[in-house]
Amino acid sequence: MMNELFNDVVSAYINGEFVAPEDARISAFDRGLIFGDGIYEVVPIYGGQAFRWDEHLARLNNNLDVVGIRQPYTRQDWAKVLVGLLSRATEQDHYLYIQVTRGVAPRNHVFPDSAEPTVFAYVQKLAPVAESAVTQGVKVVTIPDFRWHRCDIKTTSLIANVWLRQQAKEQGAAEAVLVRDGVVTEGAATNVFAVMNGIVRTAPQGPNLLPGITRDLVVELMARHGVSYEERAFTEQQMIDAEEVWITSSTNEVMPVSRINDNVVSEGRPGPAFQRVYDLYQQYKAQCRTDAKQNVG
Ligand code: PDD
């Protein structure tokens, strides 16, 4: 009964052990549970290969350093975890979830003197992005960004983000686009792009948004293929008036927005700049699958 919850989870890992998902357990005193004192990553796995693996590991390690949690594993250690988790996976797409917490200790806000980081990871089937979302676009709503001032840290303390996404859902929207002092920061779990006067804009990296791996890849692809872009913040009104708007994340890829609150964007369908960047993204993905096959062979 309970196991049905984990139907899509292929395999789990906790502190050196590969376990069945329903047996994945940690102490109730883990600081991840008590304080949300941990860092996480979500990494797509295409063709058995972790997508932008180096970038995800670099962000994980950087975040661990920032919050003073010891980096538990080397790159080789993480690769072993991934290979072990994938050993029971099929050909289809998956994602890898990684969480590192400050470990188990009696409750005290101050960091414990000696606690081993808790490492939890699992591989789960990745549902393909809905075709209707890509062909028709999704609705988003704007909501004041009431989060803290270190949104660049991918922490498991996500109560603000889950609450914001829930508010979006209750308004019939796929995402909450967050606005701080009139300026768009990011989505509850995505980064935001807007096209103005034919130039693609996305907010520059900084403390108010996550440096999304997908965002950075889209910027990289635009630079490589001569798409005009600027890393420059924009206001809520500029976004509403924009020619096109998209959101990006590891699980949503590049997704067009066709409505913001009660406003229609881009005549209610994906625009040409989206189509160009979406195609570049899909080509890049396809190349990663091909490279993965060649590595195996
Ligand atoms: N979320 N901003 C926030 C607040 C996010 O939580 C995410 C990703 C992103 C996009 O980052 P990336 O391109 O690296 O996935 C931006 C993940 C997918 C999640 O929490 O499930």
Image (cartoon, grey):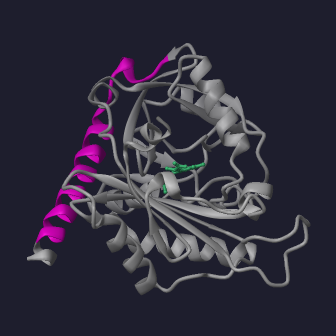
Of helix, strand and loop, which mostly describes the magenta segment?
helix
Instruction: Residue at the far front: name it.
Output: 1
| Depicted 258 relative to depicted 144: above or below | above
Instruction: Residue at the far top: name it.
Output: 262
- Left or right: residue 219 compared with residue 152: left
Residue name at image x 28 percent, y 44 percent? 278
Residue name at image x 48 percent, y 73 percent? 17
Give the magenta part as a residue range.
Answer: 264-293
Which of 257/10 is in front?
10
Give residue 241's position: percent from left, percent from top. Answer: 53, 26
Give residue 274's position: percent from left, percent from top. Answer: 32, 39
| Depicted 45 relative to depicted 297: above or below | above
- In this rendering, the count of numbered labels is 0
> Is 31 included in the stretch rendered in magenta?
no
- Left or right: residue 293 compared with residue 189: left
> Is 282 included in the stretch rendered in magenta?
yes
- Left or right: residue 229 compared with residue 170: left
| Depicted 290 relative to depicted 74: above or below | above
Q: Is residue 196 visible in the rendered structure shown here?
A: no
| Depicted 52 relative to depicted 9: above or below | below
